[in-house]
Amino acid sequence: MNMHTAVAFPHQAHSPWDAEMRVWRKAKFRTDTLWAQIKGRDATEAESDNLDALSEAETQAWNRLMYMPAPDCAALCWKLEQTMTPDEDGYTGSWDAKIANLILKDARQLSTR
């Protein structure tokens, strides 16, 4: 998963997608902040436990977004960036067929609007 890539998301309307995106952004910010604080040293046990909890919250929010229908092309683009942006080694992740099929379903539905 390429969940540590910051992505601009211009969608502004108030919708379930927007609410979940705010949850994910907040969780990602908190996770990234703690990662930055412990970079270059061993994490304490408390930091490690906190990082596990923060990472779990971020992952859960990310999963909810991925399984939620994309309300518009900007949301579809976010999903594509999350799944298709290469990692530092130049590879994209291997995704469950359900995720891939949901993204394709989003693209089909948005293309008929």
Image (cartoon, grey):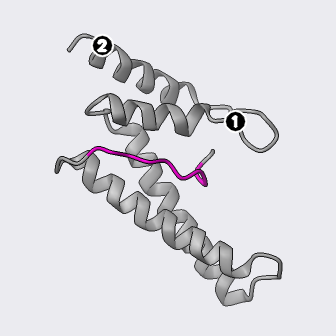
Q: Residue at x 69, y 36 (%)?
A: 86
Describe the element under mark 1 as helix, strand or loop.
Answer: loop
Q: CA distance from mark 2 to mark 1?
A: 25 Å
Residue 78 lies, in percent from the top left, at 44, 38
Examine the residues drawn in magenta and state their main secondary structure.
loop
According to the image, label 1 marks what residue? 86
Q: Amino acid at mark 1?
A: Pro
Q: Residues within 10 Å of mark 1 (few under 14, many from 20)?
A: some
Vertical placement of residue 102 versus 63, above or below? above
Horizontal arrangement in the rendering, residue 63 relative to residue 86 (left or right): left
Describe the element under mark 2 as helix, strand or loop.
Answer: helix
Vertical placement of residue 92 versus 62, above or below? above
Q: Pointer 2 and pointer 1: residues touching (CB < 8 Å)?
A: no
Give the mark, 2 or 1, whose residue is nearer the N terminus. 1
Residue 68 lies, in percent from the top left, at 33, 39
Q: Amino acid at mark 2?
A: Ser
Q: Is residue 109 magenta?
A: no
Q: Is residue 4 magenta?
A: yes
Q: Which mark is residue 111?
A: 2
**Bounds of the magenta segment:** 3-11
Q: Residue at x 72, y 80 (%)?
A: 38
Residue 88 lies, in percent from the top left, at 77, 44
Q: Residue at x 18, y 47 (%)?
A: 13
Residue 44 lies, in percent from the top left, at 74, 88
Vertical placement of residue 61 versus 17, above or below? below
